Amino acid sequence: MRTLKFLLQKEFRQIFRDPSIIRLIFIMPVIQLIILPWAADYEMKNIQLSVVDHDHSDYSRKLVSKITSSGYFILNDYAASFNQSFAEIEKDHSDIILEIPASFEKDLVKESEAKLFIAGNAINGVKANLGSVYLRTIIQDFNQSVRLEWIQIPRFSPETQIEVSTSNWYNPLMNYKYFMVPGILVILLTMVGSNLTAMNIVKEKEIGTIEQINVTPIKKYHFILGKLIPFWILGLVVLTLGFIIARVVYGIVPLGSFITIYVFAAVYLLAVLGLGLLVSTYATTQQQAMLISFFIMMICILLGGLYTSIDSMPVWAQWITKFNPVSYFIDVMRMVVLKGSTLADIKYQLLVMSGFAIVLNGWAVFSYRKRS
Amino acid sequence: MNNDKIITADKLTKRFGDFVAVNEISFDVHKGEIFGFLGANGAGKTTAMRMLCGLSLPSSGQATVAGFDVFKENEKIKKSIGYMSQKFSLYEDLTVKENMRFYGGIYGKSDQFIKDKTAFVLDHLHLENEGNKLVRSLPLGWKQKLAFSVAIFHEPVLVFLDEPTGGVDPVTRREFWNMIYQAAEKGITIFVTTHYMDEAEYCNRVSIMVDGSIEALDTPTQLKRNYGAGSMDEVFLKLARKATRMES
């Protein structure tokens, strides 16, 4: 125990004396949490719209003004021919074209039926897709109001009408930040846990101090605990800092209890610290450690369900996510923050995470050698 | 086992794949002596030393250090030895006192011991005013003297020094060797590698390694006589010229 005290004392002194670590621990989370949730937003706001109006009628103008006033579209150009606006798409100025045929008003009034044409620029598939969905909804709405203008809908309409109303549970306003902030917090914790630990140990290898440690009678587990405990504590500090920012900047307060989150985070940190330790036993230079960590982080983040839903991944990718600790924590974080899940609800994830912690640390301790 | 011997090595060998870094070396080091371990770059000195310190597992042969077997009791050896590696290995971002406290602490020394010993060492090195300075800010010569003091801080019976005076000016080298003599007078056995042949003359006995094997082992006076040389420099050149191995 006394040995551990000396190790921890030394480790904390070094951490607090290194301005770059302090910056990494305190400034990185603040910036990421303040900037990223605003920037990484799935809602499409600024869809550039080209309108080809062959009709120039009252109704076509009404429709276009309804679309532009929705707030989702910006009228890029009002062209005379389809080719003209297609040129806009080719120049990447425009995301979507709405073509209104010459007989639009006439057909609408006389035949009660009119046709419109929508062409999306699928280079940005998400934008094209969402854009045409929004556009269709607005046109449908326009359709409804035109009908209302013309005819009094009878009490019992001869046509069956199904009206759909949606209510979004757990995130009623579909506030994207509620979805992103907990996820970003997880990524931050992962970075602190795995990268800093790996870099710290490999740095000692590079400088040569680890050899000096290996020639002392120090126990392997003392050395490893001396490295893990400081970063475990720092990880929890970063988490706390993250929740303060989430509260102050976004007004996000977890629906569930903090105890649930911290219990899971404590186990999760053990797992990622083990990962960092493992990286450090295989890497001999900080550059190697950095590249290995970067590689692992990329996979963990992209297959973690932060940006893309795991449910929409192909089955083989879903299997990979089962071996990705990040995906469990993002899942748990969202469950607890948005849904108010309790420890009992996350016991499966907790169990899996404990497994990760044991396997990763066990492997790291096994492959750490005082003697080559 | 003879109690007078602090290191015994018998056909100690280390292979890295096909490469035989240390080839069946056998020698003894007596208690209290200053044992010089010479050889050209890449001759296998550091590897041999690392095996004796318990940092590297020997491929074959036998050896004991301070009465403990290097294969099975390597962690026990570590309690009795000090080690100063070729690379400077104090923590540059800790102060002089913090380094002593840390190394004293992990050898299990009491707070009182650490406090007294720190004061003694600082006084001895005339670093009383530098105790709270970061090691990074000290000049190289002082760092080396400090590293030696830290290596024997826990009062081991034997200390391994791997090229302790590399890159150090002649005055500091002289001071460094004074420190080695003082440690030897206290009964600490010194096992030292060096490239400076004048330093070899300071040793009680000297071994010279060529291509992984020990080619000569005797007192400096006897070696010079055997090889008909006027200085250790000549002895070394005669032996090292036989080397066929490339510098590593």
Image (spheres, rainbow, N blue to C red):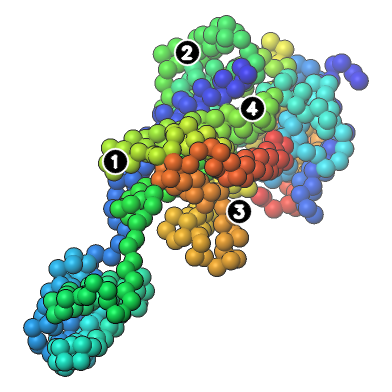
Residue drawn at point x = 49 percent, y = 65 percent: A312
Residue at the outermost right position: B1
Rendered position, A246 above or below B82: below
Q: Which residue is mark 4?
A: A222
Q: Nearer the viewer, mark 4 or mark 1?
A: 1
Asked if the residue under mark 4 is in contact with the one under mark 2, i.e. CB atoms within 8 Å, the reply is no
Task: Find residue A251 and name its label.
Answer: 1
What subunit carries mark 3?
A
Q: Which residue is mark 3?
A: A323
For badge 3, the amino acid type reads: Phe
Report the side of B55 relative to B167 (left or right). right
Percent position of residue A131, x then y: 29, 73
CA gap between label 1 and label 3 equals 33 Å
Report the side of A281 relative to A311 (left or right). right
Rendered position, A170 above or below A14: below
For badge 1, the amino acid type reads: Gly
Task: Say if labels 2 and 4 share a chain.
Answer: no
Q: Which residue is mark 2?
A: B126
Q: Secondary structure beneath disc 2?
A: loop
Percent position of residue A185, x then y: 41, 44
